[in-house]
């Protein structure tokens, strides 16, 4: 598909999207001669594994760094046979201490990390992050002519301080490091190594509707990507959140407690009664956009000791304070755990 064709398929009805996903998933399986696996995390990829085993092949293995997930997600993982549990390359605490905290978004955290770690090699990129001016390699774009390199003013105010002397600005300097390297050491690299050692290629539960870098990559490469060193399939690439939840119901997928239940509003909109998204419990990507009870509120309700560890021992409370996210006052509606 061209990017234009891909965007057109985003508006297809549910039944057509499911049919499309079946075609793409089977195509990938055949092209890889069945040497595939499903990378599994939360509800999206749990649904994908159930879908693949029904529509493609019953023996497709699942693989996951399960230890990073909410305990209720781990419980669902344990119900699957032919399921490989991978180990992260570093512990969550190690990654935070060595590289920094994952906040705002993966893309923005990467930019902040560059500002906090200036070198001669990244000077041009740092200039683009500060000003939007991309230089020769970026086609001499500016913010006015379509450059998206500049960090938004809101975040420059909080994280642009390391460049104050260069640009004559008065931005703040965060008292902690920021990084987007968590996923690499905790999830991405372990899955890459599994794929390399087994020769299997992954199915992934990514959807363009999630936005960000994922949307860009899926729009550019489509559902199935076949490269010289990397091949992968994302059968749900054109799904919306509503499509995913409807398919989960159709397949009778076990919904982890972290999500609550899948229910329907009066207008027909499906939603999960607790978390809408889950991930590693030390991840802060998107936390500033969540209404309370947010993910850390729910962690407090479900596992108070773990919440205390991340908030106080590992410093997440300081990070949330800095970016303006409330966390210390207990939120009664967070769940049914400790009150």
Image (spheres, rainbow, N blue to C red):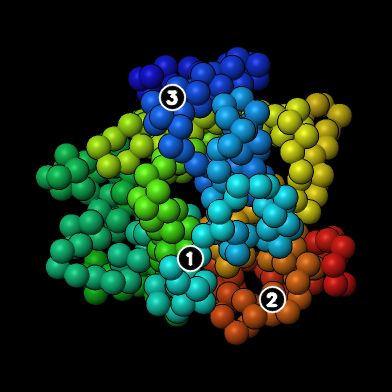
Q: Residue furthest bottom?
A: 313
Q: Are marks 3 and 2 in contact (CB under 8 Å)?
A: no
Look at mark 1 in the image and give the residue it sits on: 88
Q: Which of the two discs, 1 and 3, labels the residue nearer the N terminus?
A: 3
The total number of labels drawn is: 3
**147 in relation to 116, above or below:** above
Residue 10 in picture, x, y percent from top left: 53, 22
Quadrant placement of the C terminus: bottom right
Q: Residue at 69% of width from left, 80% of height from top?
A: 308
Decide: few, some or many residues near mark 1? Use Cα within 10 Å; few <14, some 14-19, many ≥20: many
Secondary structure, mark 1, is loop
- Nearer to me, 103 or 208: 208
Q: Which of the two discs, 3 and 2, labels the residue nearer the N terminus?
A: 3
Decide: few, some or many residues near mark 3? Use Cα within 10 Å; few <14, some 14-19, many ≥20: few
Q: Which mark is residue 306?
A: 2
289 with respect to 112 (left or right): right
Secondary structure, mark 3, is helix
Residue 94 in picture, x, y percent from top left: 46, 77
Q: Residue at 29% of width from left, 58% of height from top?
A: 130
Q: Which of the two discs, 2 and 1, labels the residue nearer the N terminus?
A: 1
Look at mark 3 in the image and give the residue it sits on: 30
Q: Quadrant of residue 283?
A: bottom right
Q: CA distance from mark 2 to mark 1?
A: 19 Å
Q: CA distance from mark 3 to mark 2?
A: 44 Å
Q: CA distance from mark 1 to mark 3?
A: 30 Å
Quadrant placement of the N terminus: top left
Residue 135 in picture, x, y percent from top left: 15, 48
**96 in relation to 14, above or below:** below
Q: Residue at 62% of width from left, 33% of height from top?
A: 58
Q: Are marks 2 and 1 in contact (CB under 8 Å)?
A: no
Q: Residue at 24% of width from left, 66% of height from top?
A: 167
């Amino acid at each position: 598909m061209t990017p234009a064709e891909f965007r057109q398929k985003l508006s297809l009805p549910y039944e057509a999207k499911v049919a499309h996903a079946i075609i793409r998933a089977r195509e990938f399986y055949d092209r890889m001669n069945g040497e595939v696996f499903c990378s599994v995390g939360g509800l999206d990829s749990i649904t994908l594994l159930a879908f693949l085993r029904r529509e493609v092949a019953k023996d497709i293995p699942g693989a996951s760094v399960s230890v990073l997930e909410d305990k209720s997600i781990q419980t669902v993982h344990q119900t699957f046979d032919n399921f490989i549990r991978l180990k992260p390359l570093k512990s969550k605490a190690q990654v935070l201490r060595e590289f920094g905290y994952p906040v705002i978004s993966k893309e923005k955290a990467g930019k902040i990390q560059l500002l906090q770690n200036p070198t001669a090699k990244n000077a041009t990129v740092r200039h683009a992050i500060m000003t939007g001016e991309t230089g020769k390699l970026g086609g001499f774009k500016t913010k006015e002519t379509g450059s998206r390199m500049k960090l938004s003013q809101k975040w420059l105010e909080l994280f642009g301080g390391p460049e104050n002397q260069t640009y004559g600005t008065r931005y703040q300097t965060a008292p902690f490091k920021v990084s987007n390297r968590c996923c690499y050491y905790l999830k991405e690299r372990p899955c890459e190594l599994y794929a390399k050692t087994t020769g299997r290629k992954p199915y992934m539960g990514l959807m363009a509707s999630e936005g960000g870098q994922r949307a860009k990559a899926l729009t550019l490469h489509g559902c199935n990507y076949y490269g010289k060193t990397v091949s992968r399939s994302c059968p749900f690439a054109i799904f919306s959140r509503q499509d995913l939840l409807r398919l989960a119901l159709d397949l009778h997928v076990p919904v982890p407690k972290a999500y609550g239940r899948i229910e329907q509003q009066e207008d027909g909109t499906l939603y999960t009664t607790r978390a809408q998204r889950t991930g590693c419990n030390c991840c802060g990507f998107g936390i500033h956009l969540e209404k309370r009870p947010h993910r850390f509120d729910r962690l407090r309700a479900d596992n108070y000791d773990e919440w205390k560890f991340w908030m106080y021992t590992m410093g997440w409370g300081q990070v949330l304070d800095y970016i303006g996210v409330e966390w210390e006052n207990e939120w009664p509606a967070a769940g049914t755990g400790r009150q």
